Amino acid sequence: MADRRLQVFHTVARLLSFTKAAEALHMTQPAVTFQIRQLEEYFNTRLFDRTHNKISLTEAGDQVFVYAERIIALYNEMDNQVRRLTGDVIGVLVVGASTTLAEYRIPTLLGDFQAKFQDVKLRLKVSNTLGVVQMVENNEVDVGVVEAPVSNKNLFVRVCWRDQLMVVCPPDHPLSGCDHLSPGNLVPYPFIGREEGSGTREVVEDYFTSHGADLGDLAITMEFGSPEAVKSAVEAGLGLSIISRDTCSKELKLGTLCAIPLDPPMTRPFSLVYQRQKFRLRAMEEFLAFVEQRCDPDTGSE
């Protein structure tokens, strides 16, 4: 077992935040501070400079971080090799998911995985696509599942499903009877959008740009941080929006919303994203294989 003080130090040094480290480790901040103080007492030197609510590594801290990374990596490698021999799949797996996926796809996926690997402790962190990518970059999650293209070349991205986005409006909206719509058809009407950093917003912006339009042409009256809030606003008659058809299946059955396809169709990828160089524990390897078996990037269905 890797020294707990070293694990705590490594997390604080990586995130440069006691608060974020405590959250990542599921510890209290005083407990994190205590572990760091013990390690500093062991080496008889400060490992962090603390000024104006910011921390940075001292020269000694830099050295400890280099060795801590090697020690923890070797420990994980040893653990993985032994688990391969014994067949055990245990450990903690932290998954990051963008908002839409966390609400509609990930719960079933994680539930099925947990049923198969009951000794793996699953943790889910939810943010918009930009936030999830940043969590992967910062090693705050082992793997992310996002709903927009990822440009970071240091990350491995695997498209698993494709999702169709459609215009949604109330049944009494002037556009509700249309067979299909173009971006220009939406301009005269109030529009409900997603927030900056949302994968849905990014895909909508790219679609408009690629078809000679601009998202700024829309009369965006409100922006929300979740598809549920967007749907509620549309149902209330505050405007129309563009969301995944999968997210509004219940409302379509109840007749509280109408969904109209865009021409040409608007689709987006649902992708796995993780660090290329990250050492993968057995639980992560099994999760990636589990998701791969359910991937269907052509049709968008599981």
Image (cartoon, grey):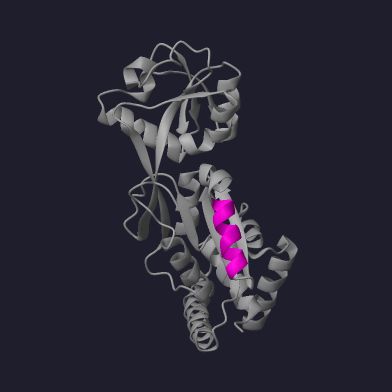
Query: Where 115 sits versus 224, above or below?
Result: below
Q: Is residue 108 left or right of residue 31?
A: left
Residue 106 shows in this picture: yes
The residue shown at (36%, 38%) is: 267
Position of residue 74 measured from the top left corner of the image (x, y, whole percent): 48, 83
Q: Quadrant of the N terminus?
A: bottom right
Residue 225 shows in this picture: no
Please state which of residues 100 and 153 is positioned toward the viewer in this rendering.
Answer: 100
Position of residue 49 measured from the top left corner of the image (x, y, whole percent): 58, 64
Position of residue 169 measured from the top left corner of the image (x, y, whole percent): 50, 20
The residue shown at (49%, 51%) is: 132
Query: Where 283 sits versus 133, above or below?
Result: below
The residue shown at (69%, 73%) is: 35
Q: Which residue lies furthest to the front in this view?
A: 253
Q: What stretch is highlighted in magenta?
A: 106-116
The residue shown at (51%, 46%) is: 101
Position of residue 56 measured from the top left corner of the image (x, y, whole percent): 54, 62
Q: Is the magenta stretch mostly helix, strand or loop?
A: helix
Q: Across the whole image, how many numbered discs are drawn on residues? A: 0
Q: Is residue 146 magenta?
A: no
Query: Where 108 sits versus 176, above or below?
Result: below
Name which quarter of the figure residue 236 lies in.
top right
